[in-house]
């Protein structure tokens, strides 16, 4: 029986070899981080409970945690060493625990740490299926493993999709002196470099290496004969088994391996290009290959062709037994019928794929077994025949195509109900993953095929398997709006909760992701079901950044916004770290009805963002006239300025929204409010060349003479862009030509008319100014004191 030491933490005052390293009492808290250092809290008051006791629960079969006294944990830890006095037996108990338990024990005391560092393991299990190591914890697990164990004989890394060549090299190097078996099957990132690091090393103990289903292992790295670093130069006198099944190795690479390692007794390379090349190079096997291709392509199940082909192949194998040949040929002959049933066939763009040349590396050509071919092409009548032919043999149901899809995945992806039922009944792995980490359940939920979903759930398919982006089957169903599929998954989750299942359960973040995908897709009933049937709150955040209401407001789904508001969503939500509010994003996207819903629910119409902008400012920026009218009706301040001094009128004028400018002028927007730099709405419109806006502003009473703080006027801005129409309009409304306008006009070689117009106006206004100044400079003539009427009359004439 396995024991878990995850929550054992001594807290005695006397320090001996079984006590913690720290001098003060420390209590470990339960943490989902399985391989990081446990979070610890200093116990300031020893009279209070500080550790956890583990009680087995009879009904649920899992562990329940309760508080206990501080002396109970060290007593249990001490009793374990006292009751198991033999060190060998104690190490045997430790060897039955998994890596997570080992890393927890390391934090308990010095004696336990030393015992783990000297532990001799027959098998270090870091596989994805049987160990607690997952993609997120693989790095921390590897770091913890490197600090533990004196020797490891068998290293199992199967299914770790994120394991890289470097990780494989580091782990094998740490235990290389005693390693006898390396299993790295179904590791997507392992390539020729990782295999080269193992095969080109020197070992007297290594007996077996398996990189089965590592699609990136092709052997092409070893094809270059010029570089010694890329040749097979390793020495493994004890190496007897090398498994390359379902990889991409070629026949040339197999020949090099046979020549380099003569001690090999088993060289598996079924369902590989090397497997097909071997059949093509033999006349008898090539004829069988062509007939098998014809049988599968044309679905000839009415004739007993497949049993006849198997009988002929078995006769060929019987004739080859005992003859001299390479280890690959001997292994293939020993495989029996599986060697024929797993031979790769050609799947091209057309059904007729009778290609016989050994070099078939063409675009659009895929190699796959007859079972994969039948599932990919929908040849459902072939499946019972192939499965019956493979009955009683080591028939591999998990071969994959170039994208990593198994026969079950292809059957589900094509919606083949009967084929899926046959494959599940035959024992296919329902949790197999493609290169993009799609499981059969994910594919079924993505298409909304409820019959297949029920079939896979009845076969205990895991619901928490996530693809590369983190989406699960529930996320796929929610994204595409398959309500019935979502309800099935939620019912299965509730059943697992009632049965206290731990493995395969969906985490809260996966439920949150499904909710947001449903909001993004506008699936009202799916959103309602997720809120009603789970513990999710309407204000839950995705990545601590955005709420469902914010996303629905952005996408413009009025019904979902109304539903979320009814469920208690905060209408005044604002994204953290300088983000904007729901009202702001709805105004930006022009969703007038959603803006009304938010304002009616209590959102502040004049709430300001970090840059002091409001929803009215962004509505003006995007030209949303209806939204602007709604915001003003609910109390938005018309002349509010941003941190740069921009008003709604200024922004609308700058963007050229003439209708919105006219509306803002009608409701009384101030015409000549200046920004921080002194620019007005008229200046912005003139600088951007918006003639209609300039005309509306001038007719609405905007001043044509208000300049920026640096002295640049709207006429100068129009001259800068060479717009003669706006310049004429500004001159008509009283703009004056200055030296800057003449200078800017002279610099434009394509604006001769503008230059002449400005020069003429400049001289005219200065001549008029000179005449006016001369008239005003003549002093008035005083009236004479004693003159006649005729003299006075003569003076007036002068």
Image (cartoon, helix red, strand yellow):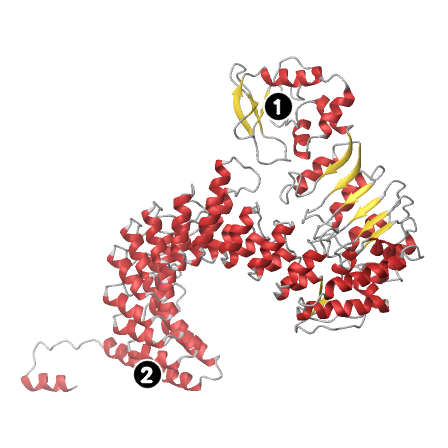
Q: Residue furthest right?
A: 324
Residue that badge 1 annotates: 8
Q: What crowding class fits label 1: few (fewer than 14 Cα within 10 Å), some (14-19), or many (20 or more)? A: many
Q: Label 1, label 2: how many angstroms apart (C-alpha)?
A: 97 Å
Q: Quadrant of residue 327?
A: bottom right
Residue 284: x percent and y percent?
Answer: 84, 67
Q: Residue at x 87, y 57 (%)?
A: 318
Q: Residue at x 67, y 15 (%)?
A: 15
Q: Residue at x 78, y 51 (%)?
A: 194
Q: Quadrant of residue 736?
A: bottom left
Secondary structure of residue under mark 2: helix
Q: Are marks 1 and 2 in contact (CB under 8 Å)?
A: no
Q: Residue furthest top?
A: 14
Q: Quadrant of the C terminus?
A: bottom left
The image shows residue 200, relative to residue 46, as above or below, that is below
Q: Quadrant of the N terminus?
A: top right
Q: Is residue 85 visible from the viewing direction of this image? A: yes
Secondary structure of residue under mark 1: loop
The label on residue 96 is: none
The image shows residue 23, relative to residue 263, as above or below, that is above
Q: Residue at x 77, y 64 (%)?
A: 309
Q: Nearer the viewer, residue 49 or 527?
A: 527
Residue 674: x percent and y percent?
Answer: 34, 62
Q: Nearer the viewer, residue 441 or 679?
A: 441
Q: Is residue 463 visible from the viewing direction of this image? A: no
Residue that badge 2 annotates: 764
Q: Nearer the viewer, mark 1 or mark 2?
A: 1
Residue 115: x percent and y percent?
Answer: 75, 25
Residue 568: x percent and y percent?
Answer: 34, 45
Q: Is residue 284 left or right of residue 454?
A: right
The image shows residue 142, relative to residue 345, as above or below, that is above
Q: Nearer the viewer, residue 249 or 406?
A: 406
């Amino acid at each position: 029986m396995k024991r878990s030491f995850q929550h054992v933490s001594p807290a005695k005052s006397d320090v001996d070899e079984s006590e913690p390293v720290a001098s003060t009492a420390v209590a470990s808290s339960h943490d989902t981080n399985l391989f990081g250092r446990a979070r610890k809290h200093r116990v300031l008051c020893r009279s209070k409970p500080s550790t956890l006791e583990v009680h087995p629960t009879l009904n649920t079969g899992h562990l329940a945690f309760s508080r206990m006294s501080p002396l109970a944990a060290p007593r249990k830890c001490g009793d374990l060493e006292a009751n198991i006095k033999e060190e060998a037996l104690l190490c045997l108990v430790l060897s039955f625990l998994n890596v997570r338990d080992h890393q927890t024990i390391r934090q308990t005391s010095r004696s336990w740490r030393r015992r783990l560092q000297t532990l001799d393991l027959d098998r270090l299990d870091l596989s994805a299926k049987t160990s607690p190591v997952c993609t997120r914890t693989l790095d921390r697990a590897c770091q913890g493993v490197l600090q533990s164990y004196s020797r490891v004989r068998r290293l199992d890394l199967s299914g770790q999709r994120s394991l890289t060549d470097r990780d494989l090299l580091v782990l094998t190097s740490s235990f290389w002196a005693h390693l006898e078996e390396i299993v790295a099957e179904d590791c997507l990132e392992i390539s020729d470099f990782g295999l080269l690091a193992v095969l080109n090393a020197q070992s007297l103990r290594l007996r077996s290496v398996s990189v089965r289903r590592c699609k990136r292992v092709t052997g092409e790295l070893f094809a270059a004969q010029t570089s010694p670093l890329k040749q097979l130069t390793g020495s493994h006198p004890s190496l007897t088994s090398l498994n390359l099944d379902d990889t991409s190795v070629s026949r040339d690479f197999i020949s090099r391996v046979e020549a380099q390692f003569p001690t090999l007794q088993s060289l598996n390379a079924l369902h590989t290009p090397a497997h097909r090349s071997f059949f093509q190079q033999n006349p008898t096997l090539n004829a069988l290959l062509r007939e098998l291709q014809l049988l599968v392509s044309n679905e000839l199940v009415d004739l007993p062709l497949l049993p006849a082909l198997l009988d002929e192949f078995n006769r060929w194998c019987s004739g080859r037994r005992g003859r001299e040949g390479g280890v690959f040929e001997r292994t293939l002959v020993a495989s029996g019928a599986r060697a024929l049933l797993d031979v790769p066939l050609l799947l091209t763009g057309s059904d007729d794929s009778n290609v016989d040349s050994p070099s078939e590396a063409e675009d659009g050509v895929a190699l796959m077994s007859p079972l994969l071919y039948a599932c990919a092409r929908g040849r459902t009548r072939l499946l019972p025949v192939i499965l019956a032919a493979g009955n009683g043999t080591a028939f591999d149901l998990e071969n994959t195509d170039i994208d990593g899809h198994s026969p079950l995945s292809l059957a589900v992806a094509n919606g083949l109900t009967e084929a899926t039922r046959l494959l599940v009944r035959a024992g296919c792995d329902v949790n197999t993953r493609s290169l993009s980490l799609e499981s059969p359940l994910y594919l079924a939920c993505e298409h909304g095929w409820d019959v297949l979903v029920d079939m896979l759930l009845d076969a205990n398919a895991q619901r928490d398997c996530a693809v590369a982006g983190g989406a699960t089957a529930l996320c796929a169903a929610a994204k595409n709006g398959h309500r019935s599929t979502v309800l099935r998954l939620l019912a299965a989750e509730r059943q697992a909760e009632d049965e206290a299942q731990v493995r395969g359960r969906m985490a809260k973040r996966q439920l949150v992701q499904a909710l947001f995908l449903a909001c993004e897709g506008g699936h009202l009933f799916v959103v309602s079901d997720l809120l009603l049937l789970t513990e999710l709150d309407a204000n839950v955040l995705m990545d601590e950044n955005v709420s469902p209401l914010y996303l629905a407001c952005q996408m413009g789904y009025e019904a979902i916004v109304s539903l979320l508001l009814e469920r208690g969503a905060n209408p005044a939500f604002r994204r953290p770290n300088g983000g904007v509010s729901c009202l702001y994003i709805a105004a930006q996207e022009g969703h007038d009805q959603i803006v009304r819903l938010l304002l009616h629910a209590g959102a502040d119409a004049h709430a300001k963002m970090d840059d002091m902008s409001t929803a009215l400012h962004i509505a003006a920026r995007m030209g949303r006239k209806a939204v602007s009218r709604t915001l003003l009706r609910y109390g938005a301040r018309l002349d509010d300025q941003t941190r740069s001094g921009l008003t709604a009128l200024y922004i609308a004028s700058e963007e050229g929204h003439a209708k919105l400018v006219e509306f803002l002028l009608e409701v009384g927007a101030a015409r000549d409010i200046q920004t921080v730099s002194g620019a007005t709405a008229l200046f912005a419109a003139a600088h951007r060349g918006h003639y209609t806006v300039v005309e509306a502003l001038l007719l609405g009473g905007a001043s044509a003479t208000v300049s920026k703080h640096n002295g640049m006027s709207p006429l100068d801005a129009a001259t800068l862009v060479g717009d003669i129409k706006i310049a004429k309009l500004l001159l008509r409304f009283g703009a004056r030509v200055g030296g800057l306008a003449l200078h800017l006009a002279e610099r434009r070689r394509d604006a001769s008319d503008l230059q002449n117009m400005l020069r003429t106006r400049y001289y005219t206004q200065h001549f008029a100014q000179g005449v006016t100044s001369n008239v005003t400079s003549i002093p008035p003539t005083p009236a004479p004191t004693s003159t006649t009427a005729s003299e006075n009359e003569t003076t007036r004439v002068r």
